[in-house]
Amino acid sequence: MIEFKYDVQLLIEGNDLDEDVIFDYITNNLKGDSLLAVGDEELIKVHFHTNEPWEVLEYCSGLGEIYDIVIEDMDRQSRGLQG
């Protein structure tokens, strides 16, 4: 069984975004692994494995507009199913 079921990927568009602040917040406040938060002051790509994808969406939506949201069930994928 996979420890963290969901692969969450999204883009945040906003002003004065800081990838280090986003990375630190998610690391310290949300349960998961495989975190990437990369970009610049106007656009950040977030990738995170978690069991609570809604928490990632809630946090990121407070920073700016979120789009290109992908949430995949990695457990289903590992069994060869669409996820």
Image (cartoon, helix red, strand yellow):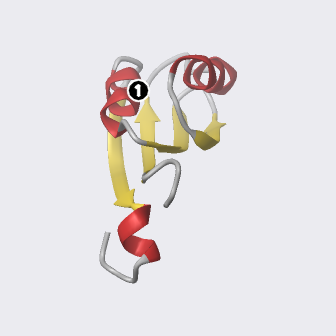
Give the number of callouts. Answer: 1
For residue 10, what is the image quadrant?
A: top left
Residue type at tag 1: Cys
Q: Quadrant of the C terminus?
A: bottom left
On the image, the x and y values in percent for residue 43 come to: 52, 35
Q: Tell me the element at label 1.
A: helix
**Mark 1 surroundings: few (<14), some (14-19) or many (≥20) residues within 10 A:** many
On the image, the x and y values in percent for residue 5 come to: 43, 52
From this view, report whether residue 38 is shown above or below residue 18. below
Residue located beneath label 1 in the image? 60
Point 41% across, 19% down: residue: 63
For the view shown, which residue lies furthest in the right direction?
20
Q: In this rendering, would 34 be left or right of 66?
A: right
Point 33% across, 44% down: residue: 67
For residue 26, what is the image quadrant?
A: top right
For residue 56, what is the image quadrant?
A: top left
From this view, report whether residue 14 is shown above or below residue 52. above
Which of these two is toward me, 63 or 48?
48
Which of these two is toward me, 47 or 78?
78
Which of these two is toward me, 8 or 60?
8
Q: In this rendering, would 21 be left or right of 82?
A: right
On the image, the x and y values in percent for residue 72 come to: 37, 60
From this view, report whether residue 12 is shown above or below residue 58. below
On the image, the x and y values in percent for residue 11 come to: 44, 42
